[in-house]
Image (cartoon, rainbow, N blue to C red):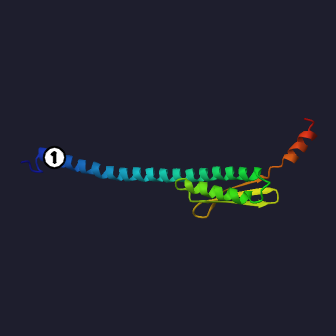
Amino acid sequence: MYGIKTEKGYKKVMEKKIGAVITVEASFVMAAVLFVCGALMKQGFYVHERNTGMLILMDALEQAQTGREEPDTAETSEQWANRALNAFYRCKGQIEIIRKGNCLTGNFKRRNGKTEGSVQVRLFEPERFLRMVRAGGV
């Protein structure tokens, strides 16, 4: 048995202390690594929700834009978009489409009510396109 006063006893005590210090430091490093991983995952879910919402909003506006013969096309597209948005994982936002004259405005709101994106398009007017083509001499 070695006492702390001998050289071998001192080395044993120091080896135990060094091992304990490394264990404590490793626990702090692991906590930081897990925190960073969690923050990255949360940011990934945020980007997924935003991109999914904007993609569905653009698709719904395109459907409402081309179906101008039916007066309730904007409402039908809005209902479809909200069903499609809620079908995706973690996408509990809301899409609203407003028709004013010949313009459609679509808004995507996240679950906290904050507007993430807004898109405005004109209704599809084939007569206007044909007039522009004819005026250009094509």
| View extreme (front): residue | 70
Query: Toward the viewer: 18 or 127?
Result: 127
Q: Position of residue 71 (x, y in %)?
A: 78, 59
Which amino acid lies under the numbered mark 1 shown in the image of this protein? Lys
At 80% from the left and 54% from the top, the residue drawn is 69
At 64% from the left and 55% from the top, the residue drawn is 81
Query: Toward the viewer: 73 or 82?
Result: 73
The image quadrant that residue 96 belongs to is bottom right
Query: Toward the viewer: 83 or 28?
Result: 83
- Badge 1 local density, few (<14 within 10 Å), some, or many (20+)? few
Q: Position of residue 31 (x, y in %)?
A: 37, 53
Q: Position of residue 39 (x, y in %)?
A: 47, 53
Q: Position of residue 38 (x, y in %)?
A: 45, 53
| View extreme (bottom): residue | 113
Q: Secondary structure at mark 1?
A: helix
At 12% from the left and 44% from the top, the residue drawn is 8
Decide if residue 130 is on the left or right side of residue 31: right
Decide if residue 44 is on the left or right side of residue 51: left
In the rendered image, the quadrant that contains the C terminus is top right
Decide if residue 80 is on the left or right side of residue 125: left
Mark 1 lies on residue: 12
For the image, the number of numbered tags is: 1
| View extreme (left): residue | 1
Does residue 62 appear anywhere in the picture? Answer: yes
The image quadrant that residue 84 belongs to is bottom right
Does residue 107 appear anywhere in the picture? Answer: no
At 57% from the left and 62% from the top, the residue drawn is 111
